[in-house]
Each structure stands twice: as C-alpha cells, then as structure tokens.
Amino acid sequence: MTKTNFTALLVEKAGEKEYRRSIVNRSLEDLPPGGLLVRVRYSSLNYKDALSALGKPGVTKNYPHTPGIDAVGEVVECLGGAFAPGDPVIVTGFDLGMNTAGGYGQYIRVSPDWAVRLPDGLSPRESMILGTAGFTAALSVWKLAGAGIGPEAGDILVTGASGGVGSLAVAILAKAGYRVTAATGKAAEKDFLLSLGAAEVISRDEVLAGSDRPMMKERWAGAVDVVGGETLVAAIKSTRYGGAVTCCGLVASPELSMNVFPFILRGVSLLGVDSVQCPMASRLKVWEKLAGDWKPAHLESVVEETTLETLEPKFHAILKGQVKGRVLVKL
C-alpha cells in the first residue's frame, strides 16, 4: 500500500496530571498491528472518550493516544478475507479507543473479529448516532425481553433519560411497543423525552422518594438504569414482583448499598449489561434489531454534529452531565 497520511486527534501527557490534545497528521505506520484497516467516516462522543481525552484514570493507560470507542467506515484492507475492500463496517467496544488508537482518527487498524458489517437499514451516519450508547441501550432492552419482560408486562422506567444511553433507551423501548416512564434531573427536557416516545416524564427526586426504606411500593415491570448508586437502588426496590432491572452505568456511584429483600421476596432480577466484550453472536442480533424494528423513529432529533476541531468543549460538558442526547463526530 502506498504511504497514506491522515488526520487524528492525539492526546499527549504534558506533565503530572496534565494532558494536551491536538489535531495532527499521522501515517498508517503509526497504527497498531491488526488484520483490518478501515477508513473512518464517523465516530461519536461517549463518557469513556472524555475520560480518555482528559487523562482521567480508568480508561487509557498509555499516551500518546487517539480516543474514540466508536467508528464506522469502509474496509481498506482485510487479512483473512472476512471483509472485502469497500465493505461498510461498524467497530464498537473491545479495546477500540481505550488503549488501541480509536475513531478520532481517519483510519483505524483492528482485529477483524471486532467488526460488524453495517446492516441493511442503517446508514453510516445513523449507526454512529446510535454508536455504543445506542448499542448499550438496545442490549438493555434485549436483556429485559430475554427475562420475559415484554411490552404487555407494564411500565418500564428509564433513569438518566436525557443522556446518550438513556434517551436512546427511551426511543428504542417506545419503538418496540413498551410504555416508558423517563426519569431525569432536568425538568427542561420533558418535551424532548416526550418527543422520543416517553409516555410519562418524572423527576429524579420522585424516583428516589422513599428509597431509604427496605422496599418501596411496586411500580415498574422493569427498568433500564444508566446512573447507578442510589438511583439503581430505588429502581430495584420499586420494581414489581418478577420484574427485572438492567444496569449499565455508574456515573452516580459504582457502589450498590441495599438489602436483598427485592431479590428474595419479589424475585426481582438485576441484569448486568456489558457492551465492550459482548459476544459477537449477540452483537450481530442487536445491531440487526437496531436496523429493523427497534430503529428509533427520530434519530436526528437526538444528535448534534461536530468535528475533531470543535470537539474539545464537549469532553468537559459530557463529564458534567451537560450533553443532551448524542454528539456525532464527522471525520
């Protein structure tokens, strides 16, 4: 292959707890080894991306580094023949953007085992409006359905509903026929959540009211929690007999401080959701659902588009909970 230069966001350690971000020119030789080379068209902004870009602990160990845990683009080269040049593919999860150069560069090189062929029914742009947030939300719905919680079971609570995962969970659940109650700490986002398909919007305080008791009044058939901490506790304690709660976030806290009464007296199930190492068989099925009957009706209403050059303030905003819906990064 001829020498190719490309643009990427590079994060470098400039001092103790000091990190510098710049847009640089890189070459394919700078990328890690891997059997699949992809020309990236879009990425997106996730909480993990901001942690990596700002040098926060827990995501990226070694710098300089290019973040971006999401990418969609066309195959340039694939060893082993799993994909052909020109095939559109999605890469999310695994180590992309964590310690492997990610989607904030115009090219990525990864294992072919990390890639999903872009399903019919999704454009590259739509796939990254969804991205890891949409995949995580859909995986949560998949887990609820697998636990026998269908639309006929009753109301589903979605916490942190105005954020990326939460807003897409509302939209996906509504599209799948569920009645959704969206909980948010941002009263101004009520109309936004109703437009996504929420039947009801309640405050975070309403979810938490009475959560200091051993159990709360049975209210939800199931819940999608993206917050963690006391919000997750309240969701579990207020879920009805035989219901299920999915857990995929820890922005409030990684701790779960509660008794076991909801589990042994009501048979409530707590379902962990991991979008990073999700097996490929499940990954393919969930993406097919997102391209089909779970595809949100108004994807463009949840997105703000940016570029690498204008991404900097978004890193700080998402960590402060100031980002509504999704941020699409056009490469």
Image: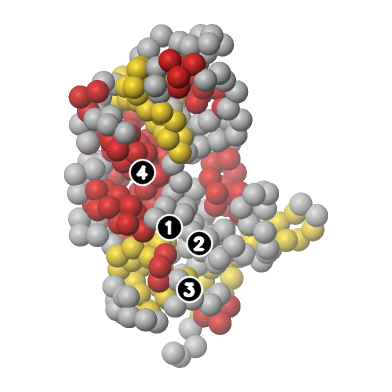
CA–CA distance between discs 2 and 3? 9 Å
CA–CA distance between discs 2 and 4? 19 Å
x, y percentage for residue 18? 75, 54
The image shows residue 217, relative to residue 14, as above or below, that is above
> Label 3 crowding class (10 Å Cα cut-off): few <14, some 14-19, many 20+?
many
CA–CA distance between discs 1 and 2? 7 Å
Residue 41, quarter of the rendered image: bottom left
Which structural element holds mark 3?
strand
Can residue 129 be seen in the rendering of this structure? no
Tag on residue 139? Answer: 4
Q: At 45% from the left edge and 19% from the top edge, which residue is drawn?
A: 264
The image shows residue 187, relative to residue 175, as above or below, that is above
x, y percentage for residue 159? 43, 27
Report the amino acid beneath label 4.
Answer: Leu
Asked if marks 4 and 3 touch (Cβ < 8 Å), the reply is no
Report the amino acid beneath label 2.
Answer: Leu
**Which residue is disc 2 drawn over?**
96
**Which residue is disc 3 drawn over?**
109
Report the amino acid beneath label 3.
Answer: Arg
Q: At 52% from the left edge and 60% from the top edge, which residue is drawn?
A: 95
Asked if marks 2 and 4 touch (Cβ < 8 Å), the reply is no
Q: Earlier in the sequence, mark 3 or mark 1?
A: 1
Tag on residue 127? Answer: none
Which structural element holds mark 4?
helix
Whether residue 84 sits left or right of residue 259 in the image: it is left
How has the structure been colored for display?
A: secondary structure
Q: At 48% from the left edge and 83% from the top edge, which residue is drawn?
A: 4
Asked if marks 1 and 2 touch (Cβ < 8 Å), the reply is yes
Which of these two is toward me, 27 or 110?
A: 110
Q: Earlier in the sequence, mark 2 or mark 3?
A: 2
The image shows residue 94, relative to residue 74, as above or below, that is above
**Which residue is disc 1 drawn over?**
92
